[in-house]
Image (cartoon, rainbow, N blue to C red):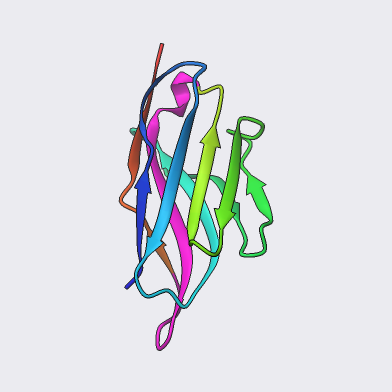
Amino acid sequence: QVQLVESGGGLVQAGGSLRLSCAADGRIFNIDSMGWYRQAPGKQRELIADISSGGVAKYADSMKGRCTLSRDNAKNTLSLQMNSLQLEDTAVYYCKAKIFAPGRGWYDTWGQGTQVTVSS
């Protein structure tokens, strides 16, 4: 089974930057899209950005212009560089990937989440 391991969260001051990383670990046959989501207290989980296996990235309006998504297909990793962080960016950030497994087909899997806290 494939697991997604996230890292890079933490405490940062408003206006600062953070880089989140996600690594797919396990017996990997194929990965389609990968993306980052976040969930703030009392709110629904929302998409920040995702990227296809071909490298086409899409960004949600909430962080467009303030973040950059990058993917390394050879290493099965995904990174999110976030800049100009604001208080409202405080949330738990989750990595998601669409994975293929023989006998199971395509399915979505999530990381455990990493906390990002922006302070004033």
Of 39 and 10, nearer the camera is 10
Task: Give yes or no for residue 55 being in the magenta stretch.
Answer: no
Q: Which residue is found at the position 47% from the left and 61% from the top?
A: 97
Q: Nearer the viewer, residue 23 or 62?
A: 23
Q: Residue at 63%, 36% (x, y): give it.
A: 61
Q: Residue 101: name its quadrant.
A: bottom left
Who's the residue at 40% across and 88% down the image? 103
Q: Position of residue 85 (x, y in %)?
A: 51, 23
- In which quadrant will I find the C terminus? top left
| Side of 78 relative to 119 (left or right) | right
Q: Which residue ends up furthest to the bottom in the rendered image?
A: 103
Q: What stretch is highlighted in magenta?
A: 86-107
Looking at the image, residue 24 lies above or below residue 116: below
Between residue 75 and residue 57, name the one nearer to us.
Answer: 75
User: In this rendering, would 76 be left or right of 54?
Assistant: left
Report x, y in % for residue 22.
42, 51
Residue 96 painted magenta: yes
Q: Where is residue 40 in the image (x, y as percent from the top left)?
A: 38, 34
